[in-house]
Image (cartoon, grey):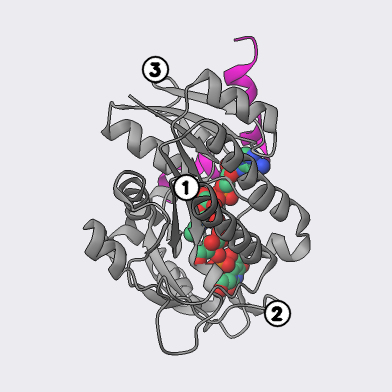
């Protein structure tokens, strides 16, 4: 049995990871440590919550005593660190919690990993640490780190620290840097679910600036399969870029969603741009493809239709987010147990 600490496992990518790995393997014991910030939703994990090889612990990765306790109690030998403050717009409004969770929290996990002789530490990072591209070129693992937002600078700081723990102490770390994810259970502050829900609710779709900023989209399960592979096979001390080579301008994503939902482009509203808005992200994922044999499996158009369908079929999930009720689910599960 591999005892894994998954942090941030109640968020979008972490919950998809836990559901995926518990559905597909029986050689893992997963401890999910999540603070349940606004972005954490235990309803994402309904299919996993009663499995005997799964435990949930509500707590903060910056809490050293709690993290030490978890390592000891569950004999943790693997860490996959998804926990983060993840939304760029929020980091522009207030950056402190980004540095507390994304930097200090990662430090707490690294120190505990060092004391407990872990076998692998996977840092789930982002392509945003590379900054912004012009019209040409791709991010490779050699692209200099040049983050532009409080969010991306906190993630870049964490990346540097993680790699330094390998260089200095020989800690077996790997870093992944993935592009923009889409799929089920994404919190409706991010572009795709926000635009789907606004359309369904007859609201305007706020497109920042000229709408020509480009993001490189990947289905969340493709990201999670890559993370699993990097965890098991990734060479320690290395960085792996993850992306599905599907660049789209924001305005084209929004129009695609409207078309799929049979609604008119009149709902689009161009609004004031995000301060410091990165123009273009695009990933060269040849390293993980050549060295570890990963490749994206999902076709963009199919996975996007599947995603839209998921939001249509799971209205109660997002209605409970809009009403705030989702934050009560924890109490129904864990009170009086
Ligand atoms: P998310 O915001 O949906 O989820 C983050 C989770 O972390 C939440 O469940 C939250 O409760 C938890 N959390 C926050 N602070 C915590 C703390 N101090 N202690 C414990 N738990 C805490 O984020 P996401 O989109 O699922 O992203 C997951 C990871 O992947 C992040 O590290 C992010 O930087 C990275 N990433 C995201 C994308 C993307 O497109 N969403 C792309 C590349 C990389
Ligand atoms: O590239 C990976 C990153 O992708 C992750 O590290 C981040 O955690 C994740 O949030 C995401 O960052 P972005 O800033 O690219 O994602 P977001 O969904 O916030 O915005 C996508 C694009 O859409 C971006 O160019 C801004 C634009 N946008 C976003 C929102 C929320 C709009 O035009 N209108 C909006 O209302």
Labelled disc at residue 196: none
Q: Residue at x 55, y 41 (%)?
A: 8
Kindly state the secondary structure of the residue where label 2 is placed: loop
Instruction: Using a 10 Å C-alpha cutoff, classify the residue at mark 3 as few (fewer than 14 neighbours), some (14 to 19) or many (20 or more).
Output: few
Image quarter hosting the N terminus: top left
Residue 64 percent across, percent down from the top left: 68, 33
Residue 335 falls left or right of residue 298 = right
The CA span between labels 1 and 3 is 33 Å
> Which residue does the numbered mark 2 point to in the structure image?
272
Residue 199 location, x and y as percent?
A: 53, 62
Q: Would you say residue 255 is visible in this rendering? A: yes
Q: Are marks 1 and 3 in contact (CB under 8 Å)?
A: no
Q: Earlier in the sequence, mark 3 or mark 2?
A: 3
The residue range painted magenta reads: 312-337
Q: In the rendered structure, which disc, 2 or 1, sits on the residue that comes first in sequence?
A: 1
In magenta segment, residue 326: yes
Residue 132 image position (x, y, % from top left): 54, 80
Q: Which label was assigned to residue 170?
A: 1
Say which of 142 and 266 sits in front: 142
Please, is residue 216 above or below residue 165 in the view?
Answer: below
Q: Is residue 75 above or below residue 185?
A: above
Residue 337 falls left or right of residue 239: right
Q: Which mark is residue 52?
A: 3
Distance from Cα at disc 2 to Cα at disc 1 = 47 Å
Instruction: Tell me: is circle 1 under 8 Å from ligand 1.
Output: no
- Residue 279 appears in which quarter of the rendering? bottom right
- The secondary structure type at the circle numbered 3 is loop
């Amino acid at each position: 049995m591999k005892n894994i600490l998954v942090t941030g496992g109640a968020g979008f990518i972490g919950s998809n990871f836990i559901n995926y790995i518990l559905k597909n393997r029986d050689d893992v014991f997963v401890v999910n440590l999540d603070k349940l910030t606004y972005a954490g939703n235990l309803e994402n994990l309904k299919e996993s919550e009663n499995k005997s090889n799964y435990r949930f612990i509500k707590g903060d990765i910056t809490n050293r005593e709690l993290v030490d306790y978890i390592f000891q109690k569950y004999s943790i030998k693997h860490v996959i660190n998804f926990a983060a403050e993840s939304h760029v717009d929020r980091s522009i409004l207030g950056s402190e919690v980004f540095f507390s969770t994304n930097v200090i929290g990662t430090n707490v996990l690294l120190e505990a990993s060092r004391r407990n002789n872990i076998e692998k530490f996977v840092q789930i990072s982002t392509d945003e640490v590379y900054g912004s591209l012009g019209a040409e070129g791709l991010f490779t693992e050699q692209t200099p780190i040049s983050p532009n937002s409080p969010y991306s600078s906190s993630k870049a700081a964490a990346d540097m620290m993680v790699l330094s723990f390998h260089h200095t102490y020989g800690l077996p770390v790997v870093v992944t840097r993935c592009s923009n994810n889409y799929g089920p259970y994404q919190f409706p502050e991010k572009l795709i679910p926000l635009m789907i829900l606004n359309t369904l609710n007859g609201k305007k779709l706020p497109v920042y600036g000229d709408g020509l900023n480009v993001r490189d989209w990947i289905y969340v399960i493709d990201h999670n399969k890559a993370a699993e592979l990097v965890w098991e096979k990734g060479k320690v001390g290395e960085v792996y870029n993850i992306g599905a080579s599907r660049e789209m301008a924001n305005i084209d994503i929004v129009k695609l969603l409207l078309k799929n939902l049979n609604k008119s482009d009149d709902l689009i509203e161009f609004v004031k741009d995000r301060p410091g808005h990165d123009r273009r992200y695009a990933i060269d994922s040849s390293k993980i493809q050549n060295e570890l044999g990963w490749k994206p499996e999902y076709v963009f158009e199919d996975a996007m239709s599947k995603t839209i369908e998921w939001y249509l079929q799971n209205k109660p999930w997002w209605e409970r987010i809009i009403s705030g009720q989702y934050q009560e689910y924890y109490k129904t599960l864990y009170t009086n147990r």
